[in-house]
Each structure stands twice: as C-alpha cells, then as structure tokens.
Amino acid sequence: MPELIDEIISPELLSEIDDPTRDLRNIIGSSMVHVPCGPNYSHSPCMINSSSTRPSYSKRFPKSFQDSIIVQEDGYPLYRRRSNGVTYIGKNGFEYDNRWVVPYNPYLSWRYQAHINMEVCASVQAIKYIDKYIYKGSDRTTLQLQETDNADEVKRNLQGRYIGPCEAIWRLFEFRMHEEFPAVYHLPIHLPKQQPVYFGEDLSRDELQLRLDTTHAKLMAWFTYNREYQDGR
C-alpha cells in the first residue's frame, strides 16, 4: 500500500531533469506550496498566538524530511519528503523545498492547473474531513458596501449566499449533491402507547379513535416492518 500511495500522491517538487518543460514544476511551485510561516512570518494566516513567546502553526508546516512513507493508524500518512536539494523560488522570493509542498496528484494538478489537495483517508478519523465539507452548508461570501462619494459613511457588511458556476451547473442538471448508503434515519424514542398523535379540533370521536388506533411512530413502524419482512432485519 505505501508504494501505491507514492504513485498517486506526492508532496515533492519536481526537478528540471524530471520535468524538462517545467510545466508541472511551475504549477506545483506556484499553487501547491504552503505560505511561509514561522518566527519571521508572524502575520501568516496559519499562525496561532503569533504575539506570544511560543507561537504555534495550525497546518504544521514546514514538515520534516522523510525518506519513505509511513502509514499511520490514527490519521493521514506521513508522506515521503526527500531531502534531495530540489527547491523552487516563489514570487515572494522565498525558497521552497519539499517540506513546504502540499500533497497533490501530478495528473490532476497538470490537468486543471490549480490548487488540488489530495489526501489518503486511511482511518475513521480522516473520514470526518470529507463529511465536514459535505455538511458545512452552502458557500458564502462577505461583501463590503461603501458609497464612493462619501468616504466618511459607516461601512456596511452583508453576508449572503454565493453559488459559483460549478455548483450552479450541478444544481441546474439536478445532480445529487451527496448520497449515503445505507440510509440512516432518526427514530424518536417513546414509552409504549406514548407516541405523539396530531389531529385537528374538528375530528369526531370515532375519527379520533381511528386516528389513535392507526397512528404509528417511526420507531414502532420500524419494529413492525422488521417483524413482517426479511429485508428489514
């Protein structure tokens, strides 16, 4: 399995020998490296408590050099990051090496020429990374509205829903946003014959009694189905 991961995901820069055209090398160097952080970069977005004497880095960059991949039981693998001397000078003048590269798939990065982070979800703890983005809700944007002819006007902020072109096309074609199998339903728990029954005030006594006799909560209906049908067990 570790060898297979190395074929799919890489957190290493390409040398000019490995990529003579420099196409993929430039894509990785410009879109798949972490912004500089550390004591000399206190304003980096990933810095936590940058003003304290012991700041921490939320994304844990730079990573350590590593000659071979290690598959962990409780999280993402420790990918191979060799100290091979390959570096890349970013637009900010910072010299990146393999410790700063975000894991990527060479084909997807070359195909779409964009930031596409690839990770191996090899444990239950890592699966939550996927569900977090599925259930976090719609994308949002913060807009700042300001009148140009009056610079002293109080700034107003509006938080509204943002639907990008990819999501818009997906919804127009009515594709599924997500799917779980098997389906999971919440079954309300109640005491015997204590399930809630809803009815209108205009029901007669006979109609009300019929409603009480035929109304079943989801929990009781689930027990009944399992008793009568084999596929429900």
Image: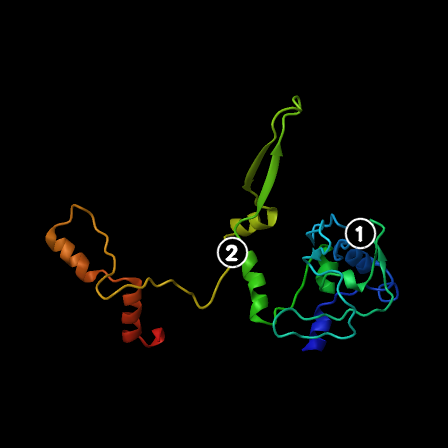
Compared to residue 42, the image places residue 63 above or below, namely below
Q: Residue at x 82, y 49 (%)?
A: 92
Q: Position of residue 41 (x, y in %)?
A: 77, 51
Q: Quadrant of the C terminus?
A: bottom left
Rendered image quadrant of residue 60: bottom right
Q: Residue at x 12, y 50 (%)?
A: 204
Q: Position of residue 85 (x, y in %)?
A: 87, 66
Numbered mark located on residue 40 in the image? 1
Q: Quadrant of the N terminus?
A: bottom right
Residue type at mark 2 is: Tyr
Q: Residue at x 31, y 73 (%)?
A: 226
Rendered image quadrant of residue 104: bottom right
Pick the residue in front: 42 or 90. Answer: 42
Query: Considering the numbered disc 1 on the image, is that residue within a helix, a strand or a loop?
Result: loop
Compared to residue 232, the image places residue 94 above or below, namely above
Residue type at mark 1 is: Asn
Compared to residue 122, the image places residue 195 above or below, namely above
| Mark 1 vs 2, N-terminal side | 1
Q: Position of residue 84 (x, y in %)?
A: 85, 69
Compared to residue 59, the image places residue 228 above or below, namely below
Q: Position of residue 20 (x, y in %)?
A: 87, 62
- Give the class, few, some or many, for how many residues have Cα within 10 Å of label 1's Cα (few <14, many ≥20): few
Indicate which label's residue lies in the foreground, 1 or 2: 1
Pick the residue in front: 56 or 23. Answer: 56
Q: Tell me the residue that label 2 is attached to.
A: 135
- 152 displayed left or right of 226: right
Q: How many marks?
A: 2
Query: Considering the numbered disc 2 on the image, is that residue within a helix, a strand or a loop?
Result: helix
- 62 displayed left or right of 120: right
